[in-house]
């Protein structure tokens, strides 16, 4: 693969990533109406406790889901407590998954990459 086609592939993938992550951001800022499930609210409470330094593990099974609790708590610590801060870990994981999809499908066509990113983005 020569340098020109490698650069073209890079810009095509960057464009796809921007398009589909942009769709996710558009959905978040203009169609997201806050938490809707008891899980979301519970993770937000535990994330606040983590941000405040009062988090402890107990018999509640939610306290063992450290990935979401710690990431929400760090977002709260950095950006304050809000719906947008609560959504940052999910948006960050979506971006990482999209990058991973592009890395896995790097030798596939632009159409195949676009379809895979569409399924990933629109199913979240």
Image (tube, grey):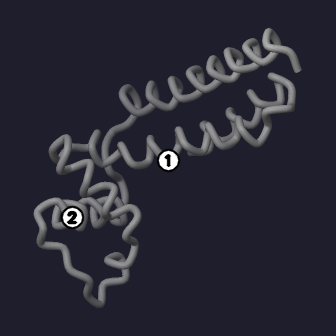
Secondary-structure class at tag 2: helix
The answer to whether residue 28 is above or below residue 75 is above
| Crowd band around label 2 with a 10 angstrom C-alpha radius: few (<14), some (14–19), many (20+) | some
* Residue 104 image position (x, y, % from top left): 76, 42
Image-quadrant location for residue 114: top right
Secondary-structure class at tag 1: helix
Residues tagged 2 and 1 counted as in contact (Cβ below 8 A): no
Q: Give the mark nearer the N terminus: 2 vs 1.
A: 2
User: Where's the C terminus, which quadrant?
Assistant: top right
- In the image shown, does 16 or 123 lie closer to the viewer? 16
Name which residue lies at 60% across and 45% down: 97
Name which residue lies at 62% across and 37% down: 99
Q: What mark, if any, has residue 93 been given in the picture? A: 1
The answer to whether residue 32 is above or below residue 49 is above
* Residue 63 image position (x, y, % from top left): 32, 77
* Residue 6 image position (x, y, % from top left): 78, 18
Separation (CA) of disc 2 from disc 1: 20 Å
Name which residue lies at 44% across and 29% down: 25
Q: What mark, if any, has residue 45 been given in the picture? A: 2
């Amino acid at each position: 693969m020569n340098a020109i086609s490698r650069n073209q592939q890079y810009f095509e993938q960057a464009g796809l990533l921007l398009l589909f992550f942009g769709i996710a951001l558009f959905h978040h800022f203009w169609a997201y109406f806050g938490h809707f499930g008891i899980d979301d609210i519970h993770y937000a409470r535990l994330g606040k406790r983590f941000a405040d330094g009062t988090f402890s593990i107990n018999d509640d099974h939610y306290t063992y889901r450290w990935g979401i609790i710690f990431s929400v708590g760090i977002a709260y610590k950095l950006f304050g407590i809000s719906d947008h801060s609560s959504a940052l870990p999910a948006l960050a994981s979506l971006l990482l998954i999209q990058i991973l999809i592009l890395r896995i499908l790097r030798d596939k066509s632009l159409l195949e990459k676009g379809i895979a990113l569409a399924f990933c983005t629109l199913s979240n």
